Amino acid sequence: MKIAPFATEHFFAEYEFTTPYQLCNSDCETVTIAELLAMAEVDLAELGQVSLGYTESQGNPQLRRALATSYATASPDDIVVLGTPVEGIYLAARALLEPDDEVIVLSPAYDALINMFEHVVGTSNVKKWQFQSTATGWKLDFDALAQKITSKTKLLVVNFPHNPTGYLPTPDQLTQLVQIVEQHNLWLFYDEMYHGLIHSGTPPIPSAADVCQRAVVLSGLSKTYGLPGLRTGWLVIQDEAPRQNVMNWKFYTSICPPAPSEFLALAAWQVREQLRQKNIAQIEQNLALAEQFFERWPDLFGWKRPHAGSVALVKMNVPSVTQFATRMAAEAGVLIHPATTLGSDDHHMRMGFGRAAFATALTQFENYLQQNRIPLT
């Protein structure tokens, strides 16, 4: 059975390692293994003593205990450590759904959050719950969500802080979302890969695991903590039946997490707040530069400042962002990400604010705009 092309990853496979100036990375500035272990006061020699045998399929018990401390209601038994975060999307889709179930996905979204569920239940059974654009930001339309729910609806898929808009619900909106899930006896797949990347002035919200018993929560070290190379992610599932079903599917995918990644994840978890605060500071520094940039180009861009996370969805008033991005990458080595891969239109791009090289890339971007006549729509 075929699955739709993973457009976002095809895009980055083509450009990420060949284009020097990048404005679209969704992760935050990373560290080396030596730097991470020094932060955690762990001797590098300890990594050399890690056995490369099989690990426990559900995850290292010590790591699961450590991860569980960040949730008010979850226990170590509720944690399933993954071989890679994206594996969690596949496992949840397989474990929760039957072929003719209906799924509602908040859109735009990382394409795995759409394609994986379409693969399992069929394209016609996946409905898009679209963000509403306002003059100053983005809006969740709960009435529109309610109208999409039928007797066949089994699962609601969301991600917050949202990729790509940078939207974060208020605590009241999170409560409303959970009430809808519980009222209709749905499952909630909640992607929290950017959890904790809260900008100044934005009220934080709890993990969905702490407010909804019917939530399957995906989290990991890639975004908030800037450690995508570890490939460490986990699911929080407080209902035993779907958790055991996930584990059965996991035996067919990764079987168990990599031992070196679990060792390094434990070290990272000791200094997670240091990593998180470092990345928030970088994001806010880059957001300040972006605000100044967009003030200089009001006719070319429609800027809506994100609430949280490391990305934003930015309107660009050109005939085709895809064509413009391709041309600029070739001519100037500057990379922007057309949001068509995320289910948006060809007049939007996703920008990322977590990297230290953002200022240099933004300067190169502006130089290119100044040197070239950009046709407006």
Image (cartoon, rainbow, N blue to C red):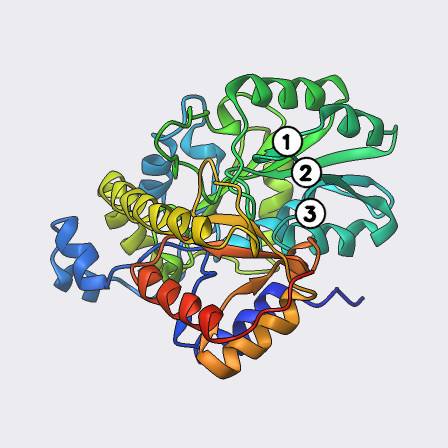
Using the image, determine if residue 206 lies above or below residue 299.
Answer: above
Using the image, determine if residue 366 lies above or below residue 184.
Answer: below
The answer for how far apart the CA atoms under marks 2 and 1 are is 6 Å
The answer for how far apart the CA atoms under marks 1 and 3 are is 27 Å
Q: Toward the viewer: 366 or 158? A: 366
Q: Toward the viewer: 272 or 203? A: 203
Q: Are marks 2 and 1 in contact (CB under 8 Å)?
A: yes
Query: What amino acid does circle 1 point to?
Result: Lys
Q: Residue at x 82, y 40 (%)?
A: 102
Query: What amino acid does circle 2 point to?
Result: Phe
Task: Identify residue for label 2.
Answer: 131
**Number of marks in picture:** 3
Task: Identify residue for label 3.
Answer: 93
Q: Is residue 49 in view?
A: no
Query: What amino acid does circle 3 point to?
Result: Ala
Task: Identify residue for label 1.
Answer: 139
